[in-house]
Amino acid sequence: SDEYQADSLGIQYARGSRYLPGAMVTFFNSLQQLTADHGGSSIPNFLSTHPLTTRRIEEVKEMLQPGDENLKVARNDYLQKVDGLVYGNNPRHGYVQGNAFYHPQMKFAFNIPQGWKVQNTPAQVALAEANGNAVILLRVEKAQSALDDYARSRLQQALQNPQILDQGSHAVNSLSAHHIIFDSAVTQDNTSVPMRGRMSCIQKNGMVYTFIGLTQRNVFQSHDPSILTPIRTFRNLNDPQHLNRRPVHVEVVKVGAATTMGRFLSQHNIPQKLHKEVLLLNLMKTGTQLSPGQLIKIIR
């Protein structure tokens, strides 16, 4: 996979530069813990844009060689480079608040089905039912053809041999849209699974927003109301409260007098709800002793 190749090259480059390649395992462990703390992900493997972190951790461990543990960790050099970086997902590129997803940069919003998980990437927004039994994908691109032609063409590109059961055009919150209900199949564990879904292509400011909702054919009726939720609530975003949302950043701070990590967090007014996250970012505990001049990452 692309991720396996990227990890393999990363290990080689680190080793070739005499840096500790095993630090990638520490990074993935931290990423896995952060994901768990934020509710995890229920996006099925066959629709995920990246392999699961646990799988990548095991693959990276297998790439390590004897002697790698003796290579250097240039912590201060690294910290100087991450100072000021956006922390987490940049809300300008989309964020979840309450039961809705907002995208300030592209000025749209939609509601999220109750209990569903959301995974936002540059390529797509993926929503998954709590047990992974139904998914919705949203992708955006320019379309040159008529909306109904575009929708049928997009369906053929997205799925294997889809069969159109019903289709029609009707607006969504004053935005032109074309809708298709279809049957298809996906392969899981070398077995073809019958699927049913709906696609809605919604036109806004020269772009087409394509929702594809998919679930197993025999449970489509029970999941269809949830699949319709983001489609029916897709809308222009005009609220300044959401349009002006700004990201938080990593700030690297130098320790003054000797103290503990717990006291350091209090001295810098880090909210209690962020303590666990900041401790994980620094691979420390509240009782960890800090020395004068030591560099610590915080979130502001």
Image (tube, grey):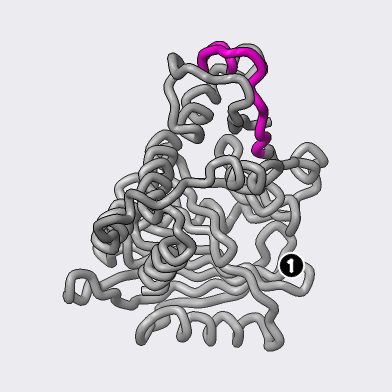
Indicate the quadrant containing the C terminus: top left, top right, bottom left or bottom right. top right
Q: Nearer the viewer, residue 298 or 273?
A: 298
- Amino acid at the residue labelled 1: Lys
261 magenta-colored: yes
Residue 199 placed where, x, y %?
50, 70
Residue 207 appears in which quarter of the rendering? bottom right
Where 141 falls versus 10 (above or below)?
Answer: below
Q: Residue at x 74, y 61 (%)?
A: 174
Q: Is residue 300 left or right of residue 89?
A: right
Residue 19 placed where, x, y %?
45, 55
Q: Which residue is mark 1?
A: 204
> Is residue 63 visible in this depiction of the protein?
yes
84 magenta-colored: no
Residue 151 placed where, x, y %?
56, 80
Q: Nearer the viewer, residue 190 or 214?
A: 190
Q: Residue at x 43, y 14 (%)?
A: 287
Q: Residue at x 35, y 76 (%)?
A: 183
Number of numbered discs: 1
Indicate the quadrant containing the N terminus: top left, top right, bottom left or bottom right. bottom left
Residue 30 appears in which quarter of the rendering? top left
Neighbourhood count class around disc 1 (C-alpha, 10 Å): few under 14, some 14–19, many 20 upward: some
Q: Is residue 134 left or right of residue 10?
A: left
Q: Residue at x 41, y 62 (%)?
A: 15
Where 239 falls versus 196 (above or below)?
Answer: above
Where 145 falls versus 24 (above or below)?
Answer: below
Q: Nearer the viewer, residue 300 or 183?
A: 300
Q: Is residue 173 left or right of residue 95?
A: right
> Is residue 42 visible in this depiction of the protein?
no
Residue 149 placed where, x, y %?
60, 87
Residue range in magenta is 250-264
Residue 32 appears in which quarter of the rendering? top left
Numbered disc 1: secondary structure: strand
